[in-house]
Image: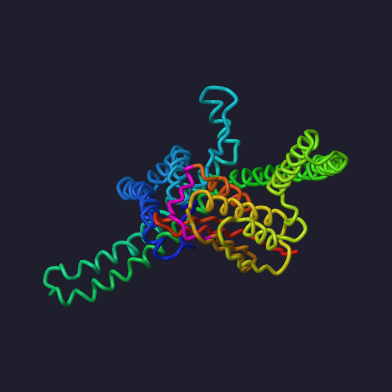
Amino acid sequence: MLTRTATAAMTRRPLAFLCSSWPWRSLVYLLGSAVYAVAACLLIYTGYVYGAWVASATALLVLVVLALPSAAFERWRLRLVDRMPTDNPHVKPPKKGLRAWLSTRAREQATWRDLGFTVVGLSVLCWMDLGLVSSAFWLPVLLMSGPFQPGMHWADGLPLAAGGVLLVPISAYMLTAWAGTRAMITRAVLAPGDAEIIRSRARLVDAFEAERRRIERDLHDGAQQRLVSLSMKLGLARLDLPPGSPAETQLAEAHEEAKRALAELRELIRGIHPQVLTDRGLGAAVEDVAGRSPIPVDVDVSLPGRLPPPVEVAAYYIVSEAMTNIVKHSEARHGFIYGRLHDDTLVLEVRDDGVGGADPAAGSGLAGLADRVAVTDGVMTLSSPPGGPTSLRVEIPCPVAV
């Protein structure tokens, strides 16, 4: 499973989502807010015992001292529901010592964001987290315990238990939805530099793609044309030699080698950047990939027109890599490629009837494809249970069709 966020996990099939670890990860993530609740209760108790002024001074001191550790804790537990990398936004002081550290922290924006988020965490978010956990987790548990409650006949408690069982999947979606929303808020406030990292990765991908096209043009217009010319000259030279002579035999072998080299070069050029993608668009390029597959592949790709080049390139290489994996590893007898543009989102799905068990960590290239999708701000999910079938689904934002 290549899903990186709790929000994206909810787009999976209901049974696959409910059987995954995401609802439990979301529950643990929200329970982490109990730390804030304990701190807030201690401040309230201090105000009750020592008065409002002492409580206010203590609260201010706690916020100043614990703002940075609290934000670090938030970034750390963010990994439960958001597997995207999260960097520390704080810069390193130019000099050693407490004074330089305090001066650096006071001047940077990240410190004040951490402080503001800690205030909101203590006053609002922790109570929302724990309140939702109480209603979404404990209510089904309480209802399911109906038949075992003292003074209640087990038959009378069965409807309550059935209601509790029905509330479990609803509660899982509620917990995961709020955990994903809270994670997005946390990342936006405490790790805003990640957006710049994504933009930087996108620029690198664009530069790499431009270089890829330059190499493709050089090979197509240079080396390929020279091999074509060489093959033609070798063919003409064979006509001037007696058939079956030693020179004609060697020249024939050289002619065949030149044709094989030309065919390999054409395959290399197609792999670097297929001309059909540039000339006719994604639909035709996918048809070309399916047509060259050694196993039968049904293609159902219907697009209203040309898509933005970055989207077409990303989608093409996803399909191409997926088909390569199917041929090499799946032992499949049949494949299927689906593509549509729904609500400004390109939806691609590649399925096969193979043995399943695809693992992104096994070096199959799926992790690299997930990174390419992430650069386009898309979502990529993989369902490949042992025994199959395997389904690779990609959703890429595509606001403009040209």
- In the image, the segment drawn in magenta is 351-362
> Please, which colouring scheme is shown?
rainbow
Q: Is residue 74 left or right of residue 158?
A: right
Residue 87 in the magenta stretch? The answer is no
Camera-side residue of 142 and 218: 218
Question: x%, y% of residue 242?
Answer: 84, 39
In depth, the one of 10 and 245 nearer the eye is 245
Q: Is residue 374 above or below residue 133?
A: above
Find residue 175 and report its horizontal and vertical position in percent. Answer: 40, 60
- How many badges with numbers are in the image? 0
Q: Can residue 124 be seen in this view?
A: no
- Please state the horizontal and vertical placement of residue 202, each as a whole percent of the image: 66, 46
Q: In terms of image quadrants, where is residue 135?
A: bottom left
Q: Can residue 199 be seen in this view?
A: yes
- The one nearer the camera, 36 or 266, is 266
Residue 355 part of the magenta segment: yes
Which residue is the extreme one toward the top? 96
Residue at 25% in and 69% down:
143
Percent coordinates x, y for residue 232 in the rendering: 84, 44
Closer-to-camera residue (145/271): 271
Q: Is residue 337 above or below residue 275?
A: below
In what quadrant of the picture does the C terminus appear?
Answer: bottom right
Please indicate whether residue 203 sits to the left or right of residue 234 in the image.
Answer: left
